[in-house]
Image (cartoon, grey):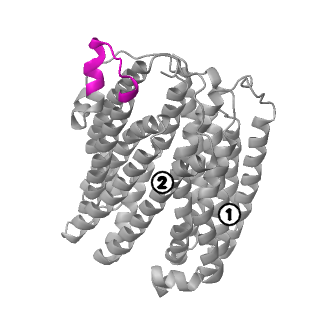
Amino acid sequence: MLAERPEAPARPGWRAGLWDAGPLALAGVAANGASLLVTLVLARLLDARGYGALNQLIGVFFVVATPGSAVLVAVVRRVTDWSGSLDGVVRWGAEVHRRGTWGLVLFAALVLVVGSPAAALLGRPDALGFDAAAVAGAVWVLLCVDRGLLQAHREYRVLSGNVLLEGGARTVFMISFGAAGLGVTGVAAGVLVAELCTAAHARYVAGRAWRSEGGAVAGRDRLTTAALAAGPRSWLGAWRRARPYGRDGAVRRDLVAAVVALAAVAVLQNADVIVIGREAPRGAGAYAAVSVSSKALVFVAIAVAGYLLPEAAISWRAGRHALRQLVVTLSVLAAPALALVAVAAAAPRLFLSAAFSSRYVSAAGAFLPLALAMVCLSVTVVVTMYLLGVGDRPFVVVLVGAAALAAVAVGLANGAPRATATADLGVQGFLLCAAVGELVRVHRPRLPCSPPSGSAGGAGAP
């Protein structure tokens, strides 16, 4: 039990840290590689109009799924701050999943009602593709509950397997449904099927992990534990009414802070693409190729931060910092970052021509500055997840301000690809300096054996 292991020591040694973070980084790289493969295959299976419509639906998925990462942060913070029996974690997880399942059903019903007018606004002749993409995004949010439980339990290899499963399932179902002639609607349905498979796997492995910790469950609680642990049956168990455990005000505060922070990160990641699409629609495709190539690094950073977030929360609760784990995370991220910058500097036109086609090389001059900007943003994302893990909320204001500044800066470039990327690099570099400064500020007053006042050390205890 966490109450009986108050130290909750972070795993010692650089080798152990690399052994934990490495699989997540590899899984993130593999999943992003699979996503690029799907993009290239579907670009050939669908006509130009269909491919554009698919990008719209993928955008719908990402918009709906935006709160998922914030839910993950809140779950990790709540569980790592737990001060009672681990049986309570099992029951609390079941209650959260029950509420999430009901929310998913209600959201799906709402989507079915508003799907037709929403699809019409997007220029889609039917609503089924929109419905599938939106519901898939909601399933991903629910999936993040179980991924948060896995992170809090330090099941990094199991989590890596779940990430790989998601990438593989998307690849198989999206390409299969597209090749079967089901069109954009079928491809969107493939995303939904893939997310359902991934969520079912996460539900099973998360329940199995926490059941092994809370083995001494009272007889009256065994049905709840079995429901959490038993694969497809755990979905049925989520419908069973369970008593909420603990005061979850801290969860709500962490959730709001994480939603705002990650929404700002999303703006920082995509503001340049939105502005280019508005100011220079003819060059948007070429810039999108550069953007997709550069911004894959941010998704790798988010994946590998799945190791850092719980390590930071656990160490901070025990009165220590997790700077070693932060350095390990950045070390793992360094390899793909260096590869990206090397390609962008040495052979941008060759890479874009080979990966996409010669039609997409006109924005090659923006590749290097945008790659450097995304390296800065990736490090900022890692530091942000660390700060969210230790309960630091003031930096959220800095992120929001930087997001607004980025929108203005790239807008002043008037749609010129290289100028847009350079402006983005300036903002991202400034934000990275601010993130490092906040990291120093948070750690300066920290004593060796006691958490600072106002830290997350005692928040959220049941």
Look at label 1 and name its amino acid. Asp
Earlier-in-chain disc, 1 versus 2:
2
Figure check: 347 above or below 402? below
Give the percent coordinates (x, y) of residue 268. Answer: 61, 55
Q: Which residues are magenta?
A: 212-226
Q: Can you tell which of label 1 and label 2 is closer to the viewer? A: 2
Figure check: 214 above or below 314? above
Is 90 situated left or right of 251 in this image? left
Mark 1 lies on residue: 424
Q: Is residue 73 magenta?
A: no
Q: Residue at x 54, y 39 (%)?
A: 259
Residue in the foreground of this view, choosing between 385 and 157: 157
Contact between marks 1 and 2 (CB within 8 A): the answer is no
Give the percent coordinates (x, y) of residue 193. Answer: 26, 52
Look at label 2 and name its amino acid. Pro
Q: Residue at x 55, y 67 (%)?
A: 278
Circle 1 residues within 10 Å: few <14, some 14–19, many ≥20: many
Residue in the foreground of this view, choosing between 263 and 141: 141
Mark 2 lies on residue: 23
Circle 2 residues within 10 Å: few <14, some 14–19, many ≥20: many
Give the percent coordinates (x, y) of residue 411. Answer: 66, 64
Marks 1 and 2, how far apart in space? 31 Å
Residue sitting at the far right:
444
Q: Residue at x 60, y 36 (%)?
A: 10
